[in-house]
Image (cartoon, grey):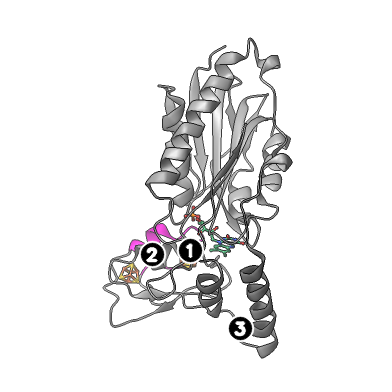
Amino acid sequence: MDIDAVQLITFSPTSTSKRVGEAIVHGTGISSVSSVDLTLKAKDEWEIPSRTLAVVTVPVYGGHVAPLALERMKGLRSDGAPAVVVVVYGNRAYEKALVELDGFVTKLGFKVIAGGTFVGEHSYSSESYPVASGRPDADDLEYARLFGEKIRTKIAAAESMDQLYGVDVRRIQRPHQPLFPLFRFLRRVVKLRKSGVSMPRTPEVDAERCTHCGYCVKHCPAGAILKDKECDTVAEKCIKCCACVKGCPQKARTYDTPFATLLSDCFKRQKEDRIII
Ligand SMILES: Cc1cc2nc3c(=O)[nH]c(=O)nc-3n(C[C@H](O)[C@H](O)[C@H](O)COP(=O)(O)O)c2cc1C
Ligand code: SF4
Ligand code: SF4
């Protein structure tokens, strides 16, 4: 059988999830492509036709799917369209995120036919404390493209929608994690928590650098930066996604958390992307 179209659905404050999704979509070779980016706003009730392949790519926050991504996908429905679920994480761990996304998308009415876990540069990564810096790199994107090709082959091999079988994403192979750095990380997290040092609730702004260009106001997914008040951040709204930090042309915004030091130190070994199909 063949499929009529492919629909990318993504939430991606710092664009790594989006780039992985675009490479997968490209790899499918399906010519009719549409893309819905839910980073800045949700889409009202919308239905994906059953002969459209949905590719859903979202970031991992705290071992879960970023909560705002799930919130933004609430209006999505389908009556059995095949879906590919992908979580993108910053080289630490994705924990429950893939299983969570699978369950969420299945409940919306999709049939999950493939899954993936890809590594993206950590939102907290900086020049001083790099964490998976530059990922997804060319190899990751090529792997994502090949994943797309495999998905197309799987669809072509099925004679009907009923024969297009689903996958159990719980069976995906976990990336190799050396134990020593993991224990070192856990020990240091406990120590950090005991020391009472708190995580900053928002990025800091260097008012002397800020030119009030408005980029951060436009690109904040949570509406936490207000026009003419670009040097402030509404802490209650901020999801610490670092879109404003990475996108500020003046480098006026920084998010320095002691957590980034730990991540940079303990997760130097680059993890592999994984797929299940
Ligand atoms: C609040 C927050 C929590 C995060 N938690 C995790 C995590 O638990 N594990 C991990 O490996 N990366 C974590 N990350 C890193 C992101 O998953 C990673 O940078 C991802 O590539 C961001 O996707 P995006 O570019 O689509 O926004 C976290 C990032 C943020 C902002
Ligand atoms: S993007 Fe940077 S320079 Fe522009 S308004 Fe925001 S903080 Fe200021
Ligand atoms: S203010 Fe907070 S939510 Fe908005 S872009 Fe910056 S880090 Fe993300």
Q: What is the number of the mark on residue 123?
A: 1
Q: Is mark 1 within 8 Å of ligand 1?
A: yes
**Depth order, front residue of 13/156:** 156
Residue nearest the observer in this picture, 274 or 214: 274
Quadrant for residue 112, please give it.
top right
Residue 217 disc label: none
Q: Earlier in the sequence, mark 1 or mark 3?
A: 1
Element on which disc 2 rests: helix
First in residue order: circle 3 vs circle 2: 3
Q: x and y percent of residue 85 in the render? A: 60, 39
Hey, what amino acid is under mark 2?
Lys
**x, y percent for residue 192:** 64, 83
Disc on res. 198: 3
Horizontal side of residue 234 vs 141, given as left or right: right
Mark 3 touches mark 2? (CB < 8 Å) = no
**Amino acid type, label 1:** Ser
Residue labelled with disc 2:
246
Number of dots carrying numbers: 3
Q: Residue at x 44, y 73 (%)?
A: 129
Q: Where does the magenta region start and end? A: 215-227
Labels 2 and 1 touching (C-beta < 8 A): yes
The quarter of the rendered structure image containing the C terminus is: top right
Asked whether the viewer can see residue 66, the reply is yes
How far separated are the C-alphas under marks 2 and 1?
A: 8 Å
